[in-house]
Image (cartoon, coloured by chain):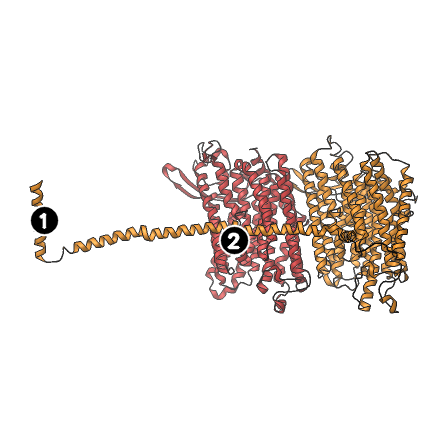
Chain colours: A red, B orange
Amino acid sequence: MLSLLIFLPLLATALILALPTSYRNSYKYIALVFTGIQFVLAGYAYMQFDASFTGINQEAQYQFVEHLPWIRLDLGTIGKLEIDYFVGIDGVSLPLLVLSAFVMLMAIGSSWNITKSLKGYYALLMVLNMAVMGIFCALDFFLFYLFYEVMLLPLYFLIGIWGGERREYAALKFFIYTLLGSVFMLLIIVGLYFSVTNPVTGAHTFNMLLMMDPANYASDGFFSQFAGHEVWGIPTRMIGFIVLFFAFAIKIPIVPLHTWLPDAHVEAPTPVSIILAGILLKVGGYGIIRTCYSIFPDAGLAAGWWLALIGVISILYGALNALAQRDLKRMIAYSSVSHMGFVLLGISSMTAEGVAGGVFQMISHGFLSAALFFLVGVIYDRVHDRDIYHYRGLAQLMPKYTGYVAITFFASLGLPGFSAFIGEAFVIIGTFNAESVGTGIPRWMAIMGSIGILLSAAYLLWTLQRMFFGETRLYGGEAWSAKLVDLTAREQLILFPSLALALILGICPFLVFDNLNASVINLVAMVRQYI
Amino acid sequence: MLAATPHNTLLYAVIATVCLPLLAFIYQAVKGRSAQTGIPSITAIIGSLLLASYIAVQVWNQPPIHFQYSWFTLGENTFYIGILLNNLTALMLVLVPLIAVPVHIYSTAYMQGDAGIHRYWMYLSLFCFAMLGLLVVDNLLLMYIFWELVGFASYLLIGFWYTRESAVQANKKAFLINRIGDLGFLIGIAIIFSEFGTLDLHALFSENGLLSQMDNLSSTWLTAAGIAFFIGAMAKSAQFPLHVWLPDAMEGPTAVSSLIHAATMVAAGVFLLARIFPLFNEHALLVISIVGTLTACTAACFALAQYDIKKILAYSTISQLGYMMVGVGIGAYDTAIFHLLTHAFFKCLLFLAAGAVIHEMQHLKQHVQGDFDPQDLRNMGGLKRWMPKTAILMGLASLALAGFPLTSGFLSKDALIISTFEWASERGLVYQLIPALLILVSILTAFYSARLIFKAFFGEPRLPYFHGVEKHPVHEPGASMLWPMVFLGICCLFPLFSLNPFSSSHSWILSGLAVPHSFAAIHALHLLIPSMLVTGTVLSITLAWKWYAQDKYPLNAQSALMLAAEKQFYINEFNQRIWVNGILGIAKGAYWLDRHIVDGLVQLFAGCVQYISKVSSWVDTHIVDGLVNGLAALTYWLGNIFRQAQNGKIQSYFLAAFFTLFMGLLYLIFS
């Protein structure tokens, strides 16, 4: 079932590539239908999911597991190579999987007006689709890495070919930045591989779940908890944690590793921005939960204070930068940095409330940021300008658009009733609670984080006031007012479900929390045993 | 969790009370521009009023009724959705729709013909939903949710005329200042959650709840939690220095100002503090009293110097909210709630009457094509000739505000000030400052209320239009505006609150709330204080009559002190300069840092890598490849040299052979 979910898009790619260019108008329908099927499959997985499974570190606690031997090599004295095709989902990956399918649908919907080399565009989009689905399902580190790298390639071309003026620069920056992280990640993967043996076969393994059990490490293995290896006076397990964290931190992104994000967002076409913000940033948060904290819980606990600090800095720094922007899209990009800081803060608190709040914030930010980027795309499509000061009083010209923007802005700034509120409030509450349970996050960090909520209200409301209220006055004059027509039915069809979802999750957070809770409790217990 | 049947009915009644306005909101939102009459909203709020009355009758003086359903579970903790009904809730639950119904009816006339009236009804219903929800919920998380929703509805309504620059500035300001308070509320929630593991009001604050079992009430974090919640209340209830949003909020329609920014929402802070009262320890309560007193004093001073009729009322609201805070701070939150209730009626009436005046001035302005501010007192005067009923109603409400006998304000204000005296007399001389200041503020209140009435309705008209034009359009408001005002006017009188017009101690509200006071009652004060207050009030009204009605104004209106008071001692300018510009400066600095340092480092790194690659490229072409090429060149050169040997001439071969032989012989001879 998961394999079908992952590899369906490949079929679409093949179909798109096989069809001659004279059928180019059918590509988008192919992409839409295949992604639609994926969404249904993801929805099916959601309905069938048993919330009592605790996931995280035991194969039996995962669901929809497919575990097949993939590459087996006898390397003589070095041992046996064991790479599995191993996929499965737990409470953490399930909501992200559903989110990915949803955001992909939004992205395809917003690609409707793209005219430049459609074949390549949709083929790459589908490859990207496969890769992100794979990442959220893979439980073998080699497989995970494979999907992680495959994800980069289509993105590079999607930004580099279909992007804005400085697209090549942005694409290159994005690619090299991410590659830098993943190269280091590979080192750790190899190190782990040589430290861990499968107790059943006796072979070295890439199985992530086996890496989470300290008993599977060779007693003098490089990453063994008991060997106490050090490099330059730093425990090897701490190094492993930091390097893995570095790779995913670039994705989240944290300050100061975030500078690829504003450039990539500003240059990327709207659908790619949607995917970047809606799905790719979540790979970072997911990776930190799935690999960093699960494989190196002891090091994670020790580094928690610094991670939380980075989270707080990201929140405040991102928000302040967003406040200083003139470019609407750049502002939203910085707001992503700020909102994803909450994810890191919540995870590092290692309280059930904080971690669940962090995952919830990822889901919520997933479709809210997608909606935000879509909304920027709406006016950019019409007049090709994103300068906040070039618009004024849009409310009179585009009342529906203003309504959607206002709702999305308020949802993003954490108005109760919308999903972002639940995420942010529980991150703050969880972080505050961390001192009581002893995970070492001081309370002032929660208070500093909450200032980010105030700042996000400031930059969003200020933008709303500057662009939408007051008397209508446009930089482009009459020509612009003719072009700035209100939302079309297609645009509303894309926006409405995402905002409806934000509202539904805000009122019924149990839709996510119920499935998530068992896994989060398991993770938190696993980490807290090292207190 | 469900109890016997009557409880079930009660539960459905509460849900219906809260959700009827929500349904109206959804209806208006879906119908959009085509639903202009406001009938759904009015029907909904009347329905809420009827149901709320039923609930209040069922709940009054009964043990608290608590419904609870699990919402979601996080970790080991389950969060609930629930309803907690007690006397306090019952009172507020009736009050809100009781004020809202006249305001709704008044709005049908007041907002008639506005292009955005469908939005008006939508927002108004949203507000009613949020406000009613805030009153009944049983835990702090849900309270926070509705707390922010009322703020959101208020944001929408302040910015109702969104093409006005001042309105959209004002609503942004209101939301942001309220956000500061919300952060306090959120931090408070976090403290409570990490200390008690629950947010349930009943479990925490009931008679044998978690807080009553605590031994040490003076711990730092308890003070911190109290102050955090108080910051939330400060923003919502416009306490100094977070009051700055309320005068600006007068940009909204006047009917909205009367409902939200005078009678109900701004009082939510007082309600919150009363609801979680056991949380506050001695230190937190003292802070509340001091801030309340400070607010009452400053706002009264600001009110003295205002010319905008709505601004005077706004500052008066702030000042009265300060009174209520003092009531909470001294531990007599029953008197605070009592004052909240009486204040809701007379302040709502004041605003509605002011709205009627503004409405007529607006008509006049359109009629004569004049250019003047219809809200400015300096443009009014002598209006009682054309609007006698409005004048009488507004005068009545002002008397209630001033605390004149036979009005409701007399009862509640006296109860509050007497309690403050009793509280202070057990503590020492410094504490006496608080009741003394409150008395002073009460006299000032009488003065500025009288000033408003005399300037607007008495004396001679100050605008030329009243004299020359025979048929100018200023007249009494229509029935749908007048009758709501008459209703509120009746509610400003004493019988609604206490059968004895001179003694608050017989009031059914105070006995219903039954708050045990920490201080002993001093009976002598019950005669002394009211007589002091009444004397002060009469004197100040007489003075105002001389100054304003008879136009014998002795002071310089342009003096620096007056201007400073009109400008709230320049607190807005201060905020703009220090906070707004400061944060924007930091933001610009952060962006500069981001561009030039953080991204600069990345660029530098990229540049370094490029430079290194250039160097290595040079090394590669000139040294590594140079070696290879040099080797090739050497081979070529050597080859060329040796090629000379292969020239095909037998003589040179012989020469070479002989030369080699000769050298060999030489070697043999000499070795």
How many labels were placed on the picture? 2
- SS at circle 2: helix
> Which chain letter goes with mark 2?
A
Residue that label 2 marks:
A129
Q: Which residue is mark 1?
A: B660
Instruction: State the quadrant of the C terminus of chain B.
Output: top left
Could you say which quadrant of the image residue A83 lies in?
A: top left
| Residue B383 point in image, percent of width and height | 88, 61
Q: Residues within 10 Å of mark 1 (few under 14, many from 20)?
A: few
Report x, y in % for residue B649.
10, 58
In percent of the image, x 7 and y 42: which residue is there? Answer: B668
Instruction: Between label 2 and label 1, give the one nearer the viewer.
Output: 1
What's the residue type where badge 1 is placed? Thr
Q: Is residue B332 visible?
A: no
Q: Are marks 2 and 1 on the same chain?
A: no
Q: Nearer the viewer, residue B40 or B668?
A: B668
B321 left or right of B609 in image: right
Q: Could you say which is closer to the camera, residue B562 or residue A347?
A: B562
Report the residue at 72% width, 36% height from top.
B223
Please give the chain letter of the residue carrying mark 1: B
Circle 1: element type = helix
* Residue B29 placement (x, y as % from top left): 72, 58
Callout 2 crowding tier (Cα within 10 Å): few <14, some 14–19, many ≥20: many
Judge from the rendering whether residue B496 lies leftward or rightward of residue B586; answer left or right. Answer: right
- Does A28 sit above or below residue A506? below
Residue B458 visible in the current orientation? yes
**Real-space CA distance between mark 2 and mark 1, rounded to the nearest whole angstrom:** 80 Å
Left or right of B615, for residue B646: left
